[in-house]
Image (cartoon, coloured by chain):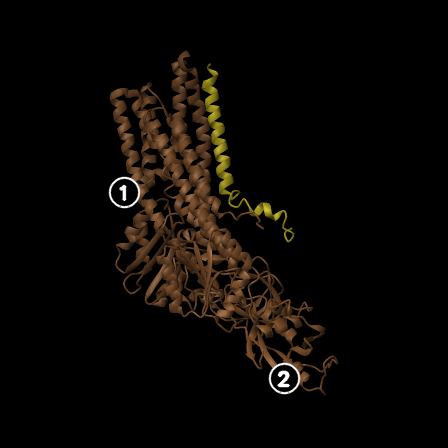
Amino acid sequence: MNIVFLLIPLGMVLMVAAVAALFWAVNSGQYDDLEDAGRTVVDPEDE
Amino acid sequence: MDHVAHASLSSLGHASWSARGVSHTVFAIEGMRCANCSRAVTRAISALPGVEHISVNAATGRAAVDWDPTTIALKKILDAVTRAGFKPLPLGGVTAASAQRAEHRLALKRIGLAGLGMMQTMMFVYCIYAAGSHGIDPAIAQYLKLAGLLIATPVLVYCGSPFFTGALRDIRRGSLGMDVPVALALAIAYTASVINTLRGAGEIYFDSVTMFIFFLLAGRFVEMTVRQRNLSATEALARSLPSTVARIAADGTTERISPELIRPGDLLSIPKGAVIPVDCRLVEGDTVVDESLLTGESTAIAKRTGESLLGGAINVGRPTRVIAMTRTSESMLASLVRLLERTQAARPSITQAADRVASWFVVLTVSLALAAALFWLFAEPTRALPAALAVLVVTCPCALSPTTPAAIAAATARLARLGLLVTRPDALERLARVDVMVIDKTGTLTCGAPVVEVTDIKGEYSRDALLQIAAALESVSDHPIAVAFRAHANKNVTADSLEEFPGKGMEGRINGTWWRLGTHQFVMDLTRPHAGAPGTPERTSATASATANSDAASAECADPHAEFAPTGIFLGTPQGLAATFSLTDGLRPDAALAVEQLRGLGLQVAIASGDEQTRVDTVARQLHIQDALGRLTPQQKLALVQQRQAAGSNILMVGDGINDGPVLAAASVSCAMARGSAVAQAAGDLLLLNDSLTTLAEGIRTARQMRAAIRQNLAWALAYNLAAVPLAAMGWIAPWVAAIGMSMSSLLVVLNAARLARPRGARP
């Protein structure tokens, strides 16, 4: 069972990585506008 | 005094305007989410000298202040808001947008961290639970608890901070808001868990703490999204103004100026796709404009040179040049934005009642939790803490506040998009109760197909006989005028030898007598046998033409306030003129549909008009309205409305909003048909911007849906709390189950309110 003492910190590191990735994504504006980006695909006047 | 308000407008971007020495300012307030918050802001501001009136709306996060610029500066008011623990924000423009974006981002990060933290702590705690009676290596159990502590701490500090700051603010000013029980539950659960972890014995609630935070944040995020979307209806209007406009100087050169600098008389160039900045007149190039943002009218409207354009409309046709008729602050767009701001900032009485109840609700919750804790402390001490926590967590006052104001805001926003502007906060509630609709015919029901009027009779024929003769003459024509005459047809009166003279009129023989119906010249020619005998068409040009009349009638419909000039249509025999008819504006094309829809909603429809009884009867007959009175003075209209109200009716009065102010004011709820610059002056709880009474039917439907949604929410809240709180107090609900229950309940009521903002699907 000693492996638990290693795996739990590893899991927490993974969580920290996930949180860091989320914060980076939010801060870089990826979640600011979830609607218009989808619309540009069907907008004929857009490249 | 104007300049004070203006200075604040330019420096801070708040929506401000002044009237009679009182400035009116609307601004957004960050961090305001419950009834107590709005009361705190109200108290902080109303304590200031020079503040005449204040209304704060928690659902929309708005405050509207009437203040005297000679006594107090706007900055003092904003400072008071800051001191109360909130952040005043300018409305519209860049700052509000970036503040909104920052709020959105922070909320997402909090939800993300809380969600991941929740999953991790649940995993750890589950290991301990799952081991159960089999026992778990105490070292591993302790290790898992420490890991839970390690994760729950940042979740509590970073994600749970809004609840603590909110609760602290509440306690500091001595009132209980919704954040108080939440913060209390979080603090107790976390502290107990930390102590139990450190001493290595007892229950831990790290999973409940993270889960509660996650679900609460998710619920508030949905609520915030709903609120921001509702606000965006107004702000879409306010922001639709372009940042610069091309002004053409006298020497033909073009300069780009800020829209605020536009003065009446300026020549502006409007490219295709651009927003028209002010109310103006088209001077060069026919075009097509989209006014959907202003009036809810979805089809684009063709505009010819010389016609007026509304500020806020989009030029979808081709590049044009226009002459400004107003400044941006005086345009219809500005009036609309101001009205919307005022409505959104005000708090309807139903919200105020809900807020008061919500405050008591919190007191009750905390007392119940305390009672449960005391009971279990004597009965079975280990169950005291989870029971108290469950009571604190499970109770859900959300149906009271903030979802009631959210429902009103959602309904208001939806109607604004349809072209029905709610100008008084209580209007929707009153609209839902309406059972009688009284319409002032002129400018509301009428306009469309021309209607025949007898204006002059010469000779021995009766009015009805003349109309029947005319109808018989027109019986074979399918011209719009003929259709109007045919409403008077009598099958006993028939004509033979009918002939149509394009551009002049009709000729035919009835009982052996030749008749002509048409232009004056055409009819008079009949009396002069040499000029044009019956049956021998004479094709000289006629100055006025009956055909042109009907075109004029339909063209007039573009502007409901323009008087339709009656144009003569003449009827005569070889013996001379027999009658003169005129065409007046007829029913609006959708009037019948609208009346039918309104009846379908259970409304009695009545007409009260100042117009001639005969004209009123014509309209009433076409719409199958029994109750139609004409020739009423404004006083008589007022008496009529009051008399019906005394009999217990809730009256919706519809008028043009300009001439019937007193009647509109007396009715239970009033709706004015308003367009263009008339919007600013129109009196009415509701303003109908697109001339279509079917929108009003939709408005009543929406108001009733809103009322139903509020009632559903209250009923749900009552049932849920009555069921859940005793169970929690008995200790039958674990704190984490309570967290799920409360979050699902509040999500349910928020979504039920948000549903109102969604336009319904296509209807026949």
Q: Determine which residue is flagged by label 2.
A: B576
Disc ID at residue B175: 1
Q: Are marks 2 and 1 in contact (CB under 8 Å)?
A: no
Q: Say above or below: B45 vs B535.
A: above
Residue B180's x, y, as percent? 31, 37
B90 relative to A24, above or below: below
Q: How far apart are labels 2 and 1 at the CA level?
A: 88 Å
Q: State the residue in front, B6 or B537.
A: B537
At horizontal 52% and vertical 67% (from top left) the residue drawn is B560
- Looking at the colours in the rendered structure, which chain would you say is drawn in yellow? A
Q: Position of residue B260 (x, y in %)?
A: 46, 66
Chain of the residue where label 1 is placed in the rendered structure = B
Q: Colour of chain B?
A: brown
Say what amino acid the circle numbered 2 marks. Answer: Gly
SS state under label 1: loop
Q: Residues within 10 Å of mark 2 (few under 14, many from 20)?
A: some
Q: Which mark is residue B589?
A: none
| Residue B543 appears in the figure | no
Whichever of callouts 2 and 1 sits on the residue coming sooner in the sequence is 1
Q: Quadrant of the N terminus of chain B?
A: bottom left
For this view, does B454 lie left or right of residue B638?
Answer: right
Spot occupied by residue B220 in the image (x, y as percentages of width and height): 42, 40
Q: Residues within 10 Å of mark 1 (few under 14, many from 20)?
A: some
In this view, the residue in front, B370 or B3, is B370
B145, above or below B92, in the image: above
* Residue placed most toward the observer, B307 or B503: B503
The answer as to whether the residues below labels 2 and 1 share one chain is: yes
Q: Amino acid at mark 1?
A: Ser
